[in-house]
Amino acid sequence: MTKTARAFTNIALIKYWGKKNQQLKLPWTNSLSLTLDRFYTDTTSEIIDSDKDVIYLNESLLDEQKSKRIVNYLNNTRKQFGFTEHFKINSINHVPTSAGFASSASGFAALAASIDQTMDLKLTKTQLSILARNGSGSASRSIYGGFVEWIAGDNNENSYAVPIDENPDIDLEVLSVVVNQKAKKISSTIGMEKSVETSPFYPNWVKLVSSETIEIKEAIKQKDIQKIGEIAEHNAMSMHALTLSANPAFTYFEPKTVEIIHLIQELRQKGIMAYVTIDAGPNVKILGTHKSIEQVKTYLNNLSDVTTVVANIGHGIQYF
Ligand code: PMV
């Protein structure tokens, strides 16, 4: 019986932004995320009698161009583990199309876990995190639930995620606000490259991440949602400052993104505890408590053209 591997997506509170090794996806800094329960990928892989992999995403067969990244990943994995089998991969993204989450984190974490199952590699969670990282950096963190830190390391064996608290008892919710579902013009890979190479602030980013990682871990230990939110928002804004200070400058923000940032700042003035974080795209994620997120939702309903999805804290890899 082929088992299904399920991986949930995660939102970085301390962002991964910049690689020191493109091929291995080794980051310049640690990063720290929260795994979310609403958005996940289910993947099965079956060995087939063929010298080509066959990839289905959401029940449709991917053409050569679209399956290239996954096939390259499988080729590297075969080389690394010394097997030659090819696969029929079936991957379903349970990410509401309105959620605006990139699926590469849950996608590569589920794929790594599925290959481990099918080939009976018996990988430890650390090895699984490394294998997921080889597909997409942020996928390294989706092996675990709750709060997770990805230790940057400096080679393929020592760059992996570790759990900080997989089942935190904390009233933290994430509201995903979608302003645009179109594919982004500048991929995270290119955005990172441009930031590292041309932003004069990149060396400061490396220092900032190191101090904010220590601070947010303390805030997590204290279950201090306000502090977690403050640090996450500052870290996200600092990441986006790297795109604005790149040469030539670019931004993932759209007018609606900025409108929501202003709204959240105003709501804080009114005493509502809410903070924003934004990845390599225009959509906004709002951190708060169950109560404050309910309040934020009522204000967002007054904005046109936005959809929202609430998520809570999610699990690590599951098999069934
Ligand atoms: O893992 P990638 O290549 O999709 O990059 C993720 C980059 C951010 O989402 C912006 C930050 C992060 O740490 O997830």
Image: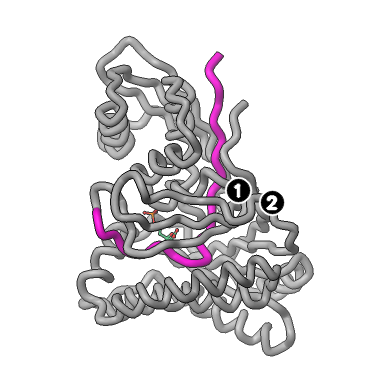
Instruction: Give the answer, above or below, for where 243 lies relative to 23.
Output: below
Pinpoint residue 18: horizontal percent, then vertical percent: 31, 63
User: Which residue is painted at 36% across and 49% down in the image?
Assistant: 158
Q: Counting other residues with Cα less than 10 Å from the Cα at mark 2, is it few (<14), some (14-19), or many (20 or more)?
A: some
Is residue 289 shown to the viewer in this render?
yes
Instruction: Give the answer, above or below, for where 67 lies relative to 27.
Output: above
Q: Secondary structure at mark 2?
A: loop
Pinpoint residue 318: horizontal percent, then vertical percent: 60, 34
Q: Image check: 240 left or right of 146?
A: left
Could you tell me the amino acid type at mark 2? Answer: Asn
Residue 1: image quadrant is: top right
Residue 297 or 280: which is nearer the viewer?
280
| Residue with the most extreme right position | 291
User: Which residue is painted at 64% across and 49% down in the image?
Assistant: 314
Q: Which corner quadrant of the figure contains ligand 1?
A: bottom left
Pinpoint residue 69: horizontal percent, then vertical percent: 30, 39
Instruction: Give the answer, above or below, for where 308 lies relative to 160.
Output: below
Colour mode of the rendering: one colour
The dot on residue 167 is 2
Q: Which residues are magenta?
A: 1-21
Residue 4: image quadrant is: top right
The mark nearer the N terminus, 1 or 2, is: 1
Could you tell me the amino acid type at mark 1? Answer: Gly
Is residue 90 shown to the viewer in this render?
no
Q: Counting other residues with Cα less than 10 Å from the Cα at mark 1, is it few (<14), some (14-19), or many (20 or more)?
A: many
| Residue with the most extreme bottom position | 269
Q: Image check: 8 left or right of 137?
A: right
Is residue 230 located in the magenta-colored stretch of the structure? no
Q: Secondary structure at mark 1?
A: loop
Residue underneath mark 1: 145
Q: Quadrant of the C terminus?
A: top right
**Do callouts 1 and 2 mark residues in contact (Cβ within 8 Å)?**
yes
